[in-house]
Amino acid sequence: MRVISFYKKWGIYLFLLVEIIIFTLLTDNFFSWNNIMNIIRQSAMLGIVVVGVSFVMICGGCDLSVGGQMAVNGIVAALLMIRFGFHPFLASLISIGLGVIMGIVNGVIVVKLKIQPLVVTLGTMTILQAIAYIVTGGKPIYGLPESFSMLGQGYIGPIPVPVVLFVIIALIASFVLRKTYFGRYIYATGGNEETARLAGVNVKLLQVTVYAICGFVTAISSLIMLSRVNSAQAGAGATYAFDCMTAAVLGGVSFSGGEGKVSGAVIGVIIIAVLGNALVLMNVNEYYQNVFKGILLIFAVALDNLQIKDKKPASE
């Protein structure tokens, strides 16, 4: 179908343009410099996680546990700095290491027990969120060192630090997927796991690795959030799993695996950030915001499924 192919190539860019025009007309402060910078910061934190989620999805997997990982990573880093006196850099390294371990655990369970990734990561998400509330008692953890605020609130020239990190991570991820054998193996495994295995790809190791990558970037994003809000909360990242999936699929990453680009996922992130920001400016209730996001996700998945059906006759 030409319409679907056109959307896959240009649709998200047109959607973003129309979205910006509409919200500029409907709100007074949407196009102000301060609001634009706020959208960019929001995009950076979500976008870093979306990069990891995209790796997993392109490889044929799914990771719903990113929200729980963010909460636990943030709490661990905060406790290490506040209660145990760890230097922010060391606490951050430990938190990132923990993120990688959580990603590896997800991957190993998926690969070794052959359980659907959706079920595995839904289970680990529930466990991690429960641990976060048990450890904190549902109360925020305050008192982070002032030097730690640079990560989430600092600037490199006129550009916020989170945005710089997001751009670096997105560029590296795009290069890896497009220009390396590792990236080609990810696409091959997501497209047809058995064919990739017969071609000599270590599919199991690759699948575990992409979950580890997702855990790595999720931990970085959790540290940025921790630094920005200056407190660790059990509910941190609660909506990230849903937002990440929506952004990735909007950006052309296929639920069935084997297809998608980091650049498209980044545009999907901006669409979600712009939507959320504009609805807040319009004083729209959070629950209505979730309705709009849900509609976007269903729309994107429906187009993805139609494209898959459209490809089948040509390949047969």
Image (spheres, grey):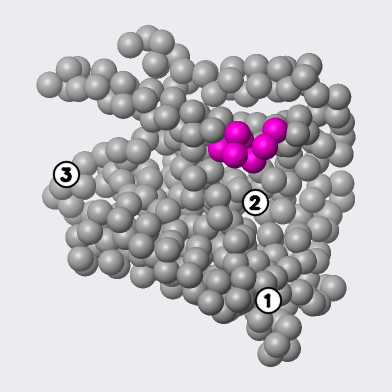
Give the SS element for disc 1. Answer: helix
Q: Decide: few, some or many residues near mark 3? Use Cα within 10 Å; few <14, some 14-19, many ≥20.
A: few
Front of the two marks 3 and 1? 1
Disc ID at residue 45: 2
Chain-order first, disc 2 or disc 3: 2
Q: Amino acid at mark 2?
A: Met
Residue indicated by mark 1: 78
Instruction: Give how far across and how far down residue 265 sits, in percent.
Output: 52, 37
Q: Which residues are magenta?
A: 284-290
Report, in whole angstroms, how far the alpha carbon at label 1 lies from the one at label 2: 18 Å
In the shown orientation, is residue 63 left or right of residue 70?
A: left
Q: Is residue 208 visible?
A: no
Instruction: Give how far across and how far down residue 124 sits, in percent.
Output: 39, 65
The answer to which of 183 and 218 lies nearer the viewer is 218
Q: How many numbered marks, from 0 up?
A: 3
The answer to which of 35 and 253 lies nearer the viewer is 35
Instruction: Give how far across and how far down residue 270 sits, in percent.
Output: 63, 35
Residue indicated by mark 3: 195
Q: Decide: few, some or many residues near mark 2? Use Cα within 10 Å; few <14, some 14-19, many ≥20.
A: many
Residue at image point 32% right, 52% down: 118
Q: Is most of the magenta stretch helix, strand or loop? A: helix
Instruction: Give how far across and how far down residue 2 sits, in percent.
Output: 37, 9
Residue at image point 55% right, 50% down: 239
The outermost residue toward the bottom is 84
Residue at image point 54% right, 50% down: 240
The answer to which of 312 and 183 lies nearer the viewer is 312
Residue at image point 58% right, 20% down: 15
